[in-house]
Amino acid sequence: QVQLVESGGGLVQAGGSLRLSCTASGRTFSRNDMGWFRQAPEREREFVAAIDWNGVVTRYAESVKGRFTISRDNAKNTLYLQMHSLKPEDTAIYYCAADEHISGLVRIAAASYEYWGQGTQVTVSS
């Protein structure tokens, strides 16, 4: 059974930092693009960041550029999202996702990702 499990969420004050992790089990995603998405209450799920299989190509939403960094450790089958200078508007459930297709396109559409974790809550207080 393929699973993506996120961890590292929590409550942090504005301006603080968190690092999210997403560990895959059941198969390796070392050749697949992966990404982070988030969903705030009563809002659509939105793209945050994505990375190609070897960590060379990354893409970010404009709202997080310069503050968030996506990375991966294929030996550990783990994806990361380092978040700095957090703002209250970053409050959301954060999901990691994996693209089943080995394309290297580093897609930003949620519909392009077939595997999803259960999410981890990030709350930023003002």
Image (spheres, helix red, strand yellow):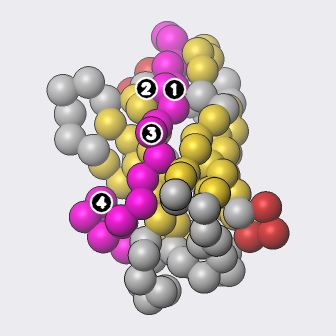
Q: Quadrant of residue 53?
A: bottom right
Mark 2 vs mark 4, CA separation in Å: 19 Å
- Magenta residues, start to end: 107-126
Label 3 crowd (10 A; few <14 / some 14-19 / many >=20): some
Q: Position of residue 120 (x, y in %)?
A: 51, 32
Residue at figure coordinates x 62%, y 49% from the top left: 22
Give the residue at mark 2: 91
- Pick out the residue farthest to the front: 1
Mark 3 vs mark 4, CA separation in Å: 14 Å
- Dots 3 and 4: beta carbons under 8 Å? no
Q: Which mark is residue 42?
A: none
First-in-chain label (3 vs 4): 4
The local secondary structure at tag 3 comes to loop
- Dots 2 and 4: beta carbons under 8 Å? no
First-in-chain label (2 vs 4): 2
Q: Is residue 125 above or below residue 76?
A: above
